[in-house]
Amino acid sequence: MKIYRRVAALAIMTTLSGIAGGAEIIGAGPAEFEGRCAVCHGLQGRGDGPFAALLLRPPADLTRLAIANGGSFPAQRVRRTIDGREAVASHGPREMPIWGRELLVEYRRSSVGIGDPETYVRTRIEALVDHLRGLQQAP
Ligand code: HEC
């Protein structure tokens, strides 16, 4: 049964991503986070989203990234984790969607047409990184 619940969760999540992807404003970190990430990580990023219980691994508490990194926000690592394309090549599949790939597909399907696809992906990810930076608990 668990697998069906997970499939259902992913289906809903994909729908939510679609809604967020339709946002016209690039760089809208909070809206992007709410639409794409909060289902698992929770609205405040604490790892307590509604789908957290359906995952094999608990979604990370994203408010503690700086604390866990000795007090400084690990922007570069966060960027790469969100993108996920590199990690997949080296570590096999993961539960978190590979946002770099999702965003690329989204770019190709839509009429965004701003710059090249990789710039689009980077811009969207950067908005999320900025948002996460703002969620950090004081060390
Ligand atoms: C389907 C659930 C799910 C969604 C949606 C999701 N994540 Fe995750 N995320 C996880 C899980 C589970 C982990 C724990 C590590 C793993 O599975 O590889 C994680 C880990 C992370 C990490 C690594 C934390 C660390 O300790 O280094 C970051 C950063 C992150 N997620 C950001 C995001 C962002 C930003 C979004 C939205 C664009 C997002 N996640 C959407 C499930 C999700």
Image: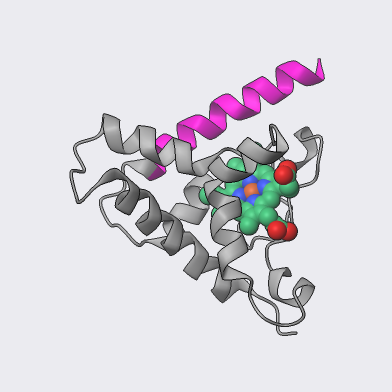
**Residue in the foreground of this view, choosing between 47 and 107:** 107
Which residues make up the magenta segment?
1-20
80 and 125: which is toward the camera: 80
Q: In this view, does 110 lie above or below 138?
A: above
Q: Residue at x 19, y 50 (%)?
A: 114
The percent coordinates of residue 32 (x first, y second) are: 44, 53
Q: In which quarter of the image is the N terminus?
A: top right
Q: Quadrant of the C terminus?
A: bottom right
Who's the residue at 71% across and 39% down the image?
A: 91
At 56% across and 73% down in the image, what residue appears?
133
Query: Which residue is located at x 35 percent, y 62 percent?
Result: 27
Above or below 49: residue 6: above
One can see residue 74 in this view? yes
Spot occupied by residue 33 in the image (x, y as percentages of width and height): 51, 55
Please indicate whether residue 136 sits to the left or right of residue 98 in the image. right
Q: Quadrant of residue 132?
A: bottom right
* Numbered marks: total: 0
User: Of helix, strand and loop, which mostly describes the magenta segment?
Assistant: helix
Q: Which of 89 and 42 is in front in this view?
A: 89
Instruction: Find residue 137 and report its image quarter.
Output: bottom right
- Whether residue 17 sits left or right of residue 49 in the image: it is left
Residue 75 lies, in percent from the top left, at 57, 69
Q: In this view, does 17 lie to the left or right of 113?
A: right
Q: Is residue 123 above or below residue 135?
A: above
Is 19 within the magenta? yes
Whether 51 is drawn above or below 71: the answer is above
Q: Which of 40 and 119 is in front in this view?
A: 119
Q: Can residue 41 be seen in this view?
A: no
Residue 44 drawn at (x, y percent):
63, 63
